[in-house]
Image (cartoon, rainbow, N blue to C red):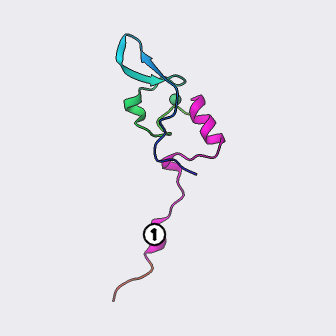
Amino acid sequence: MKKLYYIDYPQEHLKDQMHRYQCVYCKVETTVINGTLERHLASCQYRKNLETAGYETAVASGENPASHDADDFD
Ligand SMILES: [Zn+2]
């Protein structure tokens, strides 16, 4: 199970930075997270909740592109 973008996490202003936001839980800036789950810290409660719910981080996908290389040309 995988979402295209993970943007439904709670956010808050950075200290004294009214135009910048960060994850409430792991304090990683939204421009760093960039809609991806794996850029939250591993200890982030939001990330933990989604991983527990069965969502995958992009780097953890088990796709195997080599399996499509069976049709060699002569
Ligand atoms: Zn987070």
Q: Amino acid at mark 1?
A: Ala
Q: Quadrant of residue 73?
A: bottom left
Who's the residue at 56% across and 33% down the image? 42
Q: Mark 1 near ligand 1 (CB under 8 Å)?
A: no
The percent coordinates of residue 16 (x first, y second) are 37, 10
Based on the picture, tell me whether residue 54 belongs to the magenta stretch.
yes
The percent coordinates of residue 37 (x first, y second) are 50, 39
Residue that lies at the very extreme toward the top in this rendered image: 16
Who's the residue at 57% across and 29% down the image? 44
Who's the residue at 38% across and 83% down the image? 72
Decide if residue 71 is on the left or right side of residue 41.
left
Residue that lies at the very extreme toward the front in this rendered image: 8
Residue 6, compared with residue 14, is above or below; it is below
Q: Magenta segment range? A: 44-69
Residue at which label 1 appears:
66
Residue 26, compared with residue 36, is above or below; it is above
The percent coordinates of residue 24 (x first, y second) are 52, 22
Judge by depth and name the residue closer to the eye, 6 or 68. Answer: 6
- For disc 1, the neighbor class at 10 Å (few under 14, some 14 to 19, many from 20) is few
Residue 72, compared with residue 16, is above or below; it is below
Decide if residue 38 is on the left or right side of residue 30.
right
